[in-house]
Image (spheres, grey):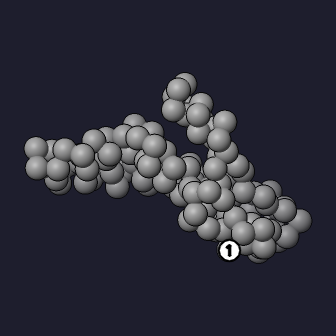
Amino acid sequence: MIPVILFSLTVHEYSHGRVAYWLGDDTAQRLGRLSFNPLKHLDIVGVLFFYFVGFGWAKPVPVDWRNFNDPKRDMMYVALAGPLANVTLAVICSFFIRVINPYENLVFFTLLCFGVYIN
């Protein structure tokens, strides 16, 4: 379960940073947060909450709205990027759950089920 949580949190935060970068804000890149390295995004308290309580968080990616051409619109896109990444991960996991045989790949099947549940 922990690898799925770390991967999901990393993709979520990376998505915020990547969309901000595409829209003109390079703050996350300059601070080294535009990375798939989970350690860059890990908030230990947030991960422990995720594990024990069922919800959690990662370190938010820094975004400077002053770098955007249309700050209101662009901040909306940046904010939506993370949840849309989670929905996309859940859909991908759901697809693979339907495709694989759970009796042949029980560990992978279980990870995919966690992927749907967590995202």
Q: Is residue 103 shown above or below 84?
A: above
Instruction: Please tell me which residue is depicted at 53% across the width and 26% down the height of the picture.
Output: 52
Residue 101: % across, % down:
12, 49
Give the answer, above or below, for where 106 lies relative to 22: above
Count the marks: how many?
1
The disc labelled 1 sits on which kind of residue?
A: Trp
Name the spot of residue 76 as percent of width and height, x first: 71, 54
One can see residue 80 in this view: no
Instruction: Please state the horizontal and vertical placement of residue 71, each as a whole percent of the image.
Output: 82, 61
Q: Is residue 32 left or right of residue 95?
A: right
Residue on which the image places disc 1: 22
Q: Is residue 36 above or below residue 72?
A: below
Specify whether 119 is left or right of 27.
Answer: left
Task: Provide the secondary structure element on which disc 1 rests.
Answer: helix
Residue at 89%, 65% in the rendered image? 66
| Residue 66 seen in the current view | yes
- Along the line of sight, the residue nearer the viewer: 91 or 71: 91
Q: Quadrant of residue 11?
A: bottom right
Q: Is residue 100 above or below residue 47?
A: below
